[in-house]
Amino acid sequence: MADISSAGTGIGPIQTSYMAMVQRKRLYSGLTLLIFILLMVVGFNTAASRNGGSFWGGLPNFFDYPSEVVAEVVEKAAALPGHFVTYFPALIETINIAAVSTLVGTVFGIVLSLLGTRGLARYPRLIPLFRRITDVMRAVPEIVIALVLIFVLGGGPVPAMLAIAFHTAGAMGKLFSEVNENVDLKPVEGLRSVGATWSQQMMLGVVPQVAPNWLSYALLRFEVNIRASAILGFVGAGGIGYELKNAISWGQGRFDVAGAIFIMLFVTIVLVDQLSSHYRDLLTHGRQAKD
């Protein structure tokens, strides 16, 4: 009985300590949330004070522009098929930019990921260097790189492709490196024991294990790059984004063209998303995706 009672009395301090710890955690969580809300309010007020117009005053007019575009598209619906035919080559150019940049960026991302993964790197001491390179490459936005390249190379699809490929290489290098860390090293060690070169170890011992995940990430990135290539058109990098910028700049009277381009972009992104989701699921699970 004495042992039981002593054990029972020993639970009290533990419970008290646990409840105190829970209270502290709730207090810290509440303070963190409060600080976050204060920062959001201060940041919003600062942005609103520097804005060219009143945010709250302009909020009732938020849907004015979309409604004008929709009204003109409906009014000139008969002209939409002609616009689809006219701007289809620009859409193909945008898709080509995304495809080439995804391919080039993925290839460089594979190399950077293998050189930056522990247990697989050709030069283990340089692993931090290759990881910082991928950090820098994905930290710089595509639009900043594109603006610099447009200044050097002039407008067109090439600066857009290089900018997106540069950012893609950094992003893929990070994602592929995380995949590489989960590989089974026994095939690599076996190949190393029989005198295989580093490239042979990677091609025969690593790539077969990670290829499905690599391809899955590459398809996902292709979706992102289509949107990025369309956005870069606004800064003179060609493609459908450049045509959309021109249509919007003309204003009323050309909203039917802007609406047609919006529809083309929306349908393209939805189709690519569905196709890539289907094939990503096949690669990773070996079955068709089920919604």
Image: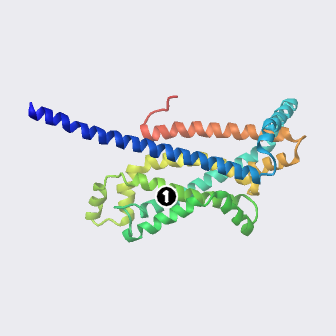
Colour mapping: rainbow
Residue corresponding to mark 1: 173
The outermost residue toward the right is 253
Total numbered badges shown on the rendered structure: 1
Residue 87 vertical position relative to residue 144 in the rendered view, above or below: above
Q: Please provide percent x and percent y for residue 269.
A: 65, 40
| Residue at image point 42% right, 70% down | 126
Q: Please provide percent x and percent y for residue 171.
A: 53, 55
Q: Residues within 10 Å of mark 1 (few under 14, many from 20)?
A: many
Describe residue 51's horizontal placement relative to residue 142 as left or right: right
Q: Is residue 84 visible?
A: no
Q: Secondary structure at mark 1?
A: helix
Q: Is residue 53 visible?
A: yes
| Residue at image point 43% right, 67% down | 128
Query: Is 58 in front, or is 181?
Result: 58
The part of the image, by quadrant, that contains residue 16 is top left
Q: Amino acid at mark 1?
A: Gly
Of the 4 image quadrants, the one containing the N terminus is: top left
| Residue at image point 68% right, 52% down | 229
Residue 109 vertical position relative to residue 290 in the rendered view, above or below: below
| Residue at image point 49% right, 32% down | 289
Q: Please provide percent x and percent y for residue 200.
A: 37, 62
Describe residue 94's horizontal placement relative to residue 135 as left or right: right
Describe residue 10's horizontal placement relative to residue 81 as left or right: left
Describe residue 123's horizontal placement relative to residue 159 as left or right: left
Residue 186 vertical position relative to residue 151 in the rendered view, above or below: above
The part of the image, by quadrant, that contains residue 238 is bottom right
Q: Please provide percent x and percent y for residue 150.
A: 73, 64
